[in-house]
Image: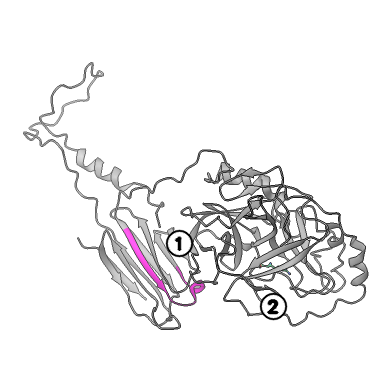
Amino acid sequence: MKYFLLSILSITASSVNSKTTTIFDVVVSDGGDSPEAADSQDYFATRAGAVPAPKDFDRIVGGEEIGPGDYPYLVQLGNSGGSLIAPDLVLSVAHAGNRANDQVHISVYETNTLSAGSQERYCEEWIAHPSFDDVNFFDLDFALCKLNKPVTIDRSRIRLVLNEDAAVPSGGEDLIIIGAGALREDGEDFPDIVQEVIVPEVNNTFCNQIDDVTDFSPPPIYLDVINENKLCAGFVEEGGKDSCQGDSGGPLIKRTVDSDGSIVDVLVGIVSYGRGCARPGFPGVYARTSAGVDWIKDTACNTLQSTASFCDNGAVAPPPEPCQGPELTYTVAIASDPQDVFTRLESGRRTIFFRRYLIADYVNEHKVCLEYDREYKFEIVGGGGCSGDGSLCGWFSLSIDGVTIFEGNGREYSFLESFTFQTLSAPAVSFTTTPTASATLPPTGFPTSVPTSVPTSVPTSVPTKTSKSTKSTKSSKKTSKSSV
Ligand code: ARG
């Protein structure tokens, strides 16, 4: 077999109480007891006068490194974070934009590198909350990403639960933020290991009255826009600890301990925005999980057909569809700068497969089911460079049904390459019964009545158009689906 290459162009512990729905790796809970709300006026008193300049903080901002396996549900996705809420579902923020086709890093510990049992998948489908940003700044900042293949994580030590109680958190209780985001405001400074930090809840009424219009141009991102769909957390007086750029979509949790001693992290919020990072006077703003939980469940179960146990829809992961046409396998090794790399396969003007990368020092393999007798264009952008120890350098290769059509190796430079290739015609149709004689005369007319009985013997001659129509049916099989 031969394929034609047409051209190469170049923690506060409390027990989780009632109202708990068990779902796959997520338990929907009301979050436990609610301590009394703090007096929001305290905060006002302390921030009278000018807003102090941001200090020189380091870390998530002001946090410390997590340990391997500490947060198995944490996800790194594009320049954002997320939480695995079912084997096939990541919850993130709408403001991250559509991340469909992005590589995602599950159980992330070391950023951009698979380690400590972390795994990679792709976002197959991305759905943002339909009312995102509708009324108030970054309102309902929720999005769901359905994974291309379900993933199993270790839940023996820690489980994540979705908070359903609008009154949780409250009273300035301690919450944990985790993320791979910037260590300081406006910094180019990103950590190698995921960071965690504890910040107190900040009362909504207070947060909604933070006047951020006097010092900055509108729109206000606090004043009168902190509605019941949002939640604030941070050290209003002293600042210094906060989420920051790149943490968006990641979890804000209230840590609780189950009766059996295992840890249950209640997902109360999702990192959304803030004025700068860790500035006194400006706490972080989070999408309030309880305000999105109905949409999350409805979309997960009814639109995305998630296998989440809270769905109760009997959905199981469909088995991979067998490829009826030629199958393309392409391998892309990425040593460094994975986020600068993408690959695309087009047919005509249609993109039929697209991947944006996140993991360095990793060899990706993709499989795409193609159609017979068609021209395709493959494109790869970026991918140069070698890993720090030189053990891996960027390269890629393509094969169809085991036959190599392009092989690159040891490319120690950035590349943009695109080339086209042509698939073979569909193989000829074979018959199980061999005709005993060839037709001597064409039919002289169409049948006028329906057959009254089933034929009892094998036809003795072959209709003349059979093989052609079979061939075209075969080549029109669905190709946009692929397994990776
Ligand atoms: N919007 C940022 C992101 O996309 C998150 C900023 C959080 N800021 C804060 N001060 N807590 O990553």
Q: Which residues are magenta?
A: 328-342
Quarter-wise, where is residue 283 in the image? bottom right
Where in the figure is residue 432, as x and y percent of width and height?
15, 37
* Figure quadrant of the C terminus: bottom left
Residue kind at label 2, given as amino acid type: Arg
Q: Element type at marker 1?
A: strand
Q: Which mark is first along the chain, 1 or 2? A: 2
Residue kind at label 1, given as amino acid type: Phe
Toward the viewer: 334 or 458? 334
Q: Which mark is residue 184?
A: 2
Q: Residues within 10 Å of mark 2 (few under 14, many from 20)?
A: many
Q: Element type at marker 2?
A: loop
Where in the figure is residue 220, as x and y percent of width and height?
81, 65
Q: Is residue 469 visible?
A: yes
In this rendering, the answer to whether 20 lies above or below 399 is above
Indicate yes or no whether the magenta region holds residue 34.
no
Residue sitting at 21 percent across and 20 percent down?
454
Indicate yes or no whether the magenta region holds residue 341.
yes
Q: Is residue 138 visible?
A: no
Q: Quadrant of ligand 1?
A: bottom right
Query: Is residue 122 rendered to the left or right of residue 220?
Result: left
Q: Which residue is mark 1?
A: 354
* Figure quadrant of the N terminus: bottom left
